[in-house]
Amino acid sequence: MIASITLGVPDLDRAMTFYRQFMEAVGWDEKFATRRSPPGPWAGFHPLGCDGPLLILAHPDCPHSPTRPGTGPAITFAVATRARVDAAHAEALALGGSDAGAPGPAYPPPSYTAHVRDPFGNLLGITCPSGA
């Protein structure tokens, strides 16, 4: 199980404009956001009704920030339906993300997956593992 993933973002306000809506589209909620340093400026999101895993967005001034924003790992969010994959992909594009793989069948079958890059270049996947 992944406890947290941290993405570096050069502009926390702009990142929050994107991520608040995108995370809602994949069924996640904001857990915290602070400009206080340390530990911030940073923000965190988690699945509705759960404490983790946690997605953290960290400004370069945050001690937890990766050194090179936009070059972090690919992160894939599991969702319950193909419709949620389609909706989250569309929402990410509407919020200024770029397409990195249109929704469609994926490995392992019967998965259905889409990929986008956020406005900072981070790669995000949305998958319905059951393909339902």
Image (spheres, grey):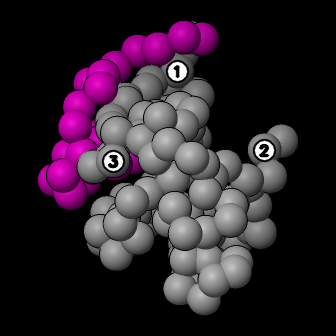
Left-right relation of 71 to 47 = left
Can residue 83 be seen? Answer: no
Other-residue count near label 3 (Cα within 10 Å), few / some / many at <14 / 14–19 / ≥20: some
Q: Position of residue 90 (x, y in %)?
A: 22, 45
The image quadrant of residue 63 is bottom right
Q: Position of residue 70 (x, y in %)?
A: 42, 41
Residue depicted at x 30% and y 22%? 101
Q: Which residues are magenta?
A: 82-108
- How many numbered markers are drawn? 3
- Residue pointed to by mark 1: 111
Element marked by disc 1: loop
Mark before the other along the chain sequence, 2 or 1 = 2
Q: Quadrant of the N terminus?
A: top right
In magenta segment, residue 76 = no
Q: Name the amino acid, label 2.
A: Ile
Other-residue count near label 2 (Cα within 10 Å), few / some / many at <14 / 14–19 / ≥20: few
Residue depicted at x 60% and y 11%? 108
- Residue pointed to by mark 3: 120
Between the residue at mark 2 and the residue at mark 1, the CA separation in whole angstroms equals 20 Å
